[in-house]
Amino acid sequence: MSRYNAKDIEEKWQKAWEQAGCFAVQEDPEREKYYVLEMFPYPSGKIHMGHVRNYTIGDVVARYKRARGFNVLHPMGWDAFGLPAENAAMDRGIHPARWTYDNIATMRAQLKLMGLSIDWDREIATCHPGYYVQQQRLFLAFMKAGLVYRKESSVNWDPVDQTVLANEQVIDGRGWRSNALIERRKLSQWFFKITAFSDVLLSALDEMERWPEKVRLMQRNWIGRSEGATIHFEIEGRSDRLTVFTTRPDTLFGASFCALAANHPLSAEVAAKDPAAQAFIEACNRLGTSEEAIEKAEKQGYDTGLRVRHPFLPGQSLPVYIANFVLMEYGTGAIFGCPGHDQRDLDFARKYALPVVPVVLPPDTDPAGFEIGTEAYVGDGTAINSGFLDGLGVEAAKRAAVERLETDGNGEGTVQFRLRDWGISRQRYWGCPIPVIHCPDCGPVPVPEDQLPVALPEDVSFDTPGNPLLRHPTWKQAVCPACGGPAERDTDTMDTFVDSSWYFARFCSPRAEAPMDRQAVDYWLPVDQYIGGVEHAILHLLYARFFTRALAEVDQVSVSEPFAGLFTQGMVCHETYRDAAGKWLFPEQVEKLADGGARQVETGGAVSVGRSESMSKSKRNVVDPETIIDTYGADTARWFMLSDSPPERDMEWTDAGVEGAWRFTQRLWRLVTENHGQMAPGGTPAPANLGAAALEMRRTVHKTVHAFSDDLEKFRFNRAVARVHELANALAGFAPDDDGGRFVLREALEMMVRLIGPMMPHLAEELWHGLGHESLLADEPWPAADMALVADEQVTLAVQVNGKKRATVSLPMDAPEGQAQELALAEPAVQRAMDGKAARKVIVVKNRIVNVVV
RNA sequence: GCCCCUGUGGCGGAAUUGGUAGACGCGACAGACUCAAAAUCUGUUUCUCGCAAGGGAGUGCCUGUUCGAGUCAGGCCAGGGGCACCA
């Protein structure tokens, strides 16, 4: 029995597509465009299974839309700046550029093995000066438009490595390399004014119907619009006021303290005269900058000795604390605490023995017996102990409180967003240099157009701590473009999220001299289908949305949203293995035993099998895509990726699963090639009459084409795969015995080959040619189902008695309800279940079900 | 701590979106072919009572809505993801 040789055949067709230039595209106003984009990869070294899944899904969409007649743009590039390149430089002494470009070469070759329908002419890498010079232009355009500004913000500072650390590099308050205690340090940095778009970024989500609801919800929560009030408390013995933000102005009568963020200006002022306050602030600063670390830490405070006057209760005042759970970045960096109706405030009040006054009475509660114990009451209710607010519901009380604050000049109703401006300065080498020169006299001055790009110097070293750009002997020396005096370059580079915030636009005109060619972006944008991991649901996608609006504001694009459709795929998981000593083992080191256990291949030692987790190098539960492609071919790998698990969900990679996919690849090949002799010749017209078996087969084929196409449209690839299995099963039992049968067999095989085209493009191309076609399947239109053959003639209805299935009846499609009822009641099993009683009610749902109620 | 998601046979999952639970695949078992193995083909496979015909239970747990709930509502339990300098 001959076998399908994936390796040779895949290479053959990849060359054929390349020679024919199938996937190179140009703007064509005559044709409807479709832009398919998968999130571009970070060139970390080799492709991993997550990439294989991502690009397989994207390629199915791209090839399908192409067959549907769209002018499809499907490009690929590299998110090539980032921290790992610098880590490699430090660990192995390789220059980040060398490391990155080597990785790109490796990964490009690997991706090409997958047979993706990509227009490689448009390839870009964000670390290439041709890309980042355009990004510098955009930065300067944003600066001119007032969308960029400078302010101080806190960072994790590693005092030993002399560097800023990402939150993930801070482990238990210590630097991951140096193990030194991390400090919070203030740096003057560049910010993008994303908050100028808070409202539109939020409201536009309502119209983004082709985005998953969960991503829209996450973004809504992230932007975090809340209505509330700012309240100005008079500080006793001072002329200035303390301004706080609250979402619960209705609970003001229950306030028992105010609290400041550790880095609030007033905290600093107190600390200047109070060493104990200073020590407390320093302790807070050791907490790290992540919200998680701050929220999970034990609530602690320091009494500043200051007191503020209660705006509604003359003569009463509240203590002011510095507290470790108040964030300077949100609201005004200060709060008032109402322990009765906020859990954090309650924990704090109990700790520092502050009063707890209930001011909201839950519905149907006796005020006499109502007390706050260990749990704050955050629900709706009626105001009590609240002076002029007494008796009002929460919403009404909020309005009344705000009204009084405004009348008295003690505050005002405000809308607050959780969203903060985007700090983009990074004290790192491997990123896009910020094109600004700092002049002692003129301040920050944009680098003039004729001096762009501000290129990264190549002669840098990573053997000493700190930012290589900062300590480079000459790079930062510059002349002020405004006054001509000596000045210094900004030695920071941009957050790599900036690079990925506009690459989709650059793909439209990747070699343009300007950031983008307006005609090209106007034709291609927005991206019709964006595909990537859900881990980017907030940051990357929100930044790209902001960036697009900013680009529109500086008149670079016409669209306001970058991604019309979004699909978030799940992760690829694998079982984890450990030896007796608890060390992680690679899957190839482990042999599964028949009894379900496992042992080590080399030593025969015990292996404990852990749960399936997202593939990661640290847990060694990885399978190398190149090995898989080498063994089984790209089509099998692609097919398995699409089988079984719905694409939005996590999937488990198993050896048995790939082998199953590989067997099916071989089976399809045999099914088509072994039936060549039984088929009608190509081009034979459909006979007027078909035998019963042939007609049934033909119906199955057209139903499959119809359902399969619908599944592709809806990203239900696993079901589409199942339908091809069903069709193959049906074909295996079909032996034509007349011209009609032979016609149906050819039609069935051709249809099946065309359906699998987007999923297993090489096999499909090979079989297509085997069927006698000269054209490339990649250029063929999508097959159409004959709707007359898709509709069923007979339907089977379930018959229930009191909701329990007792029988089924078969009758013509759309038969009248009376007929269904009559047939159902005549069923012996139904009669038995009715036990001689009369039917009280019979519910008939056409073509679905009959339910007899007795 | 806050926010989000998921839960169906031995396993991955399907279920026309409130209407026949378990499609399809994997695994397992039995059989055919073979000197034998591999490959391939055929059949069985939710659990349970029964020789059978046939019955009972069943979609993480509890309560509810409905003629009818895997699907809707409320409350729990378990697992996973994100939290602004990883990309």
Image (cartoon, rainbow, N blue to C red):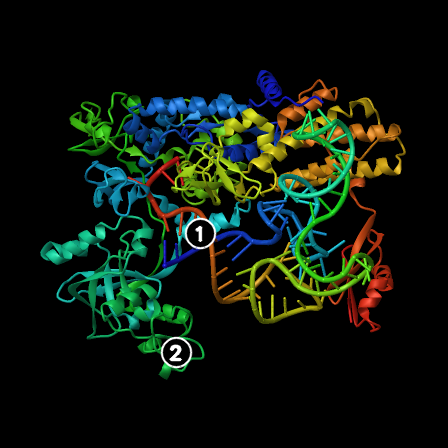
Q: Secondary structure at mark 1?
A: helix
Type of amino acid at the residue the image marks with label 2: Gly
Q: Secondary structure at mark 2?
A: loop
Q: Position of residue A394 (x, y in %)?
A: 40, 70
- Residue at point 56%, 35% (across, down): A655
Pick the quarter of the image with the N terminus of chain A: top right
Q: Mark 2 against mark 1, which lies toward the viewer?
A: 1
In this rendering, the count of numbered labels is 2
* A291 relative to A34 in the view: left or right: left
Q: Can residue A60 be seen by looking at this rendering?
A: no
**Chain at tag 2:** A
Which residue is label 1 attached to?
A: A220
Type of amino acid at the residue the image marks with label 1: Arg
Pick the quarter of the image with the C terminus of chain A: bottom right
* A535 relative to B8 in the view: left or right: left
In front of the other: B20 or A97: B20
- Dot 1 crowding, Cα within 10 Å, few <14, some 14–19, many 20+: many
Which residue is label 2 attached to?
A: A391
Q: Which one is earlier in the sequence, the residue at label 2 or at label 1?
A: 1
